[in-house]
Image (cartoon, rainbow, N blue to C red):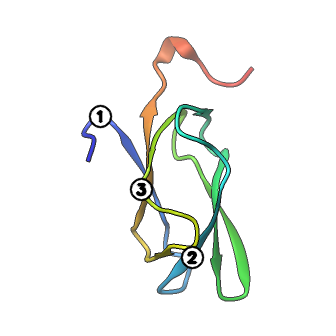
Amino acid sequence: MYPEMVPIILPNLGTDRAVLSAWYVHPGETVYAGDRVAEVLIPGATVDIPAPIDGVLVERQAGVDQALFPGSVLGYLSPLAAEEGGPS
């Protein structure tokens, strides 16, 4: 784990497992809090997973078609420095 990194965590979606169906960002890309970074499938629904902070995707921990459980780490973000700012 990266101590200075912020994990992207699968929230409790009311089911005991989900399947990662897509990544919308690649390592090295900048995202802003609330941006869609991934998509998971749960019974009867497709759910977007948002970025928890403004940052750069450093690493993907989960792969497409991987079964996940609430609390699973999907990947890690490196926080943007305050001077880098957010979207304009």
- Where does the image place residue 18, in percent across and percent down from the top left? 55, 78
Residue 19 shown left or right of residue 77 in the figure? right
Residue where numbered disc 2 is placed: 19
Residue where numbered disc 1 is placed: 4
Q: Amino acid at mark 2?
A: Val
Distance between the Cα atoms at labels 1 and 2?
Answer: 27 Å
Residue 87 shown left or right of residue 69 in the figure? right
Q: Amino acid at mark 3?
A: Gln
The residue at the point 35 percent across, 38 percent down is 5
Q: Secondary structure at mark 1?
A: loop
The residue at the point 59 percent across, 40 percent down is 33
2 or 3: tag closer to the N-terminus: 2
Q: Considering only vertical position in the picture, is 65 above or below 42?
A: above
Q: Residues within 10 Å of mark 2 (few under 14, many from 20)?
A: some
Q: Considering only vertical position in the picture, is 55 above or below 65?
A: above
- Where does the image place residue 75, in percent across and percent down from the top left? 44, 51
- Where does the image place residue 9, in percent across and percent down from the top left? 45, 59
Distance between the Cα atoms at labels 2 and 3?
Answer: 13 Å
Distance between the Cα atoms at labels 1 and 3?
Answer: 16 Å
Q: Amino acid at mark 1?
A: Glu
Q: Residues within 10 Å of mark 1 (few under 14, many from 20)?
A: few
Q: Are marks 2 and 3 in contact (CB under 8 Å)?
A: no
**Among the 4 quarters of the image, the one containing residue 22:** bottom right
Q: Are marks 1 and 3 in contact (CB under 8 Å)?
A: no
87 or 78, which lies in front? 78
Q: Secondary structure at mark 2?
A: strand
1 or 3: tag closer to the N-terminus: 1
Residue where numbered disc 3 is placed: 61
The number of numbered badges drawn on the structure is: 3
Q: Secondary structure at mark 3?
A: loop
1 or 2: tag closer to the N-terminus: 1
